[in-house]
Amino acid sequence: MSDYVIVVDLSANISMDFVREHDLIFIPMNYSIGSEERVSSEMESDEMMKEFYKAQREGVETKTSQITPQQYVEFFEPYLKEGKDIVYLSLSSGLSNTFNSVCLAKRDLEEEYPDVHVYPVDTLAGTGCVGLISEQAALNREAGMSAEENYNNLCELVDSLCHVFMVDDLMYLHRGGRVPKSTAIMGTVLNIKPVLIVNEEGKLPMIDKKRGVKPAMNRLVEIYEKTHRTDMNRVYIVHADALDRAEFLRDKVLAINPNADIEIQMLCPVIGAHTGPGMCAILYYGDRHHLD
């Protein structure tokens, strides 16, 4: 196996079995529930996430903290001292300054350690799509790709990462600065279930709105059917304490694509803090340019 490490930030949803089997590394991320500060160092348990979404339903504020350049330096430096390159899978630059922070850390580290390299991949993605591309990074390494070859392949693959999702309450996305207040108020007042994507710039446009949960979920399925790739069948279905919705989406996806390899997961807190309970999503490889 090529001698470099693959680091994933915890905006990802990814199978912990895969993480352990393929030696992926998480960089910790901070989040808070009310006044309680927590550090996420791996995927949180379903029990923990149920508490998280219960607190949101009760009106407790949830927040996340961005990783600073210095935190990246401190986390990456021991691997560079060992002579190992780093491939890092970052949350979308369209949603956070995380990617900018890691690029600043890369600049400083490579000045001090010129014989090794940090390769930050702007996934223009979040949650299960970061999981998908992280899985591919591990498989590429095991196939013998160098860190640079892997980085180049992953940058090309970003263009195929598709996110389609619905939320119950757009006010969570508004509080995090992800959607305008006018959009959030409209959805709340009219009891509209917005359908959103993560676009080519890694941002969150609303592409449709439906009255009721089931029409919104059917719209997600319709987009999946139109845009999924048939040569890459790994799919994440992610939910914010809404397992019934995730199972509905799983059954619909399998009816379209019986070869789909589906993983259902509870949405991670780093993203869940900004979407609120009830969110559900299909994350897959497809035609990212025609999700609307």
Image: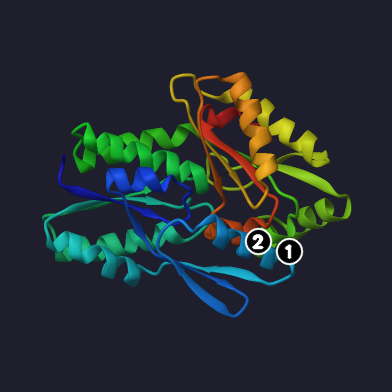
Question: Which quadrant is home to the C terminus?
Answer: top right
- The residue closer to the viewer here, 287 or 4, is 4
Amino acid at the residue labelled 1: Arg
In the picture, measured across the screen, residue 240 lies left or right of residue 38, that is right
Q: Which residue is mark 2?
A: 53
Tell me which corner region of the image, top left, top right, bottom left or bottom right, holds residue 215: top right
Residue 57, labelled with which disc?
1
Dot 2: few (<14), some (14–19), or many (≥20) neighbours within 10 Å? many
* Residue 46 drawn at (x, y percent): 55, 55
* Residue 18 drawn at (x, y percent): 36, 43
Which residue is depicted at the point 69% across and 60% down?
A: 172
* Residue 147 drawn at (x, y percent): 22, 43
- The residue closer to the viewer here, 203 or 227, is 227
35 relative to 202, above or below = below
Say what secondary structure mark 1 lies in.
helix
- The residue closer to the viewer here, 14 or 74, is 14
Toward the front, the furthest residue is: 47
Say what secondary structure mark 2 lies in.
helix
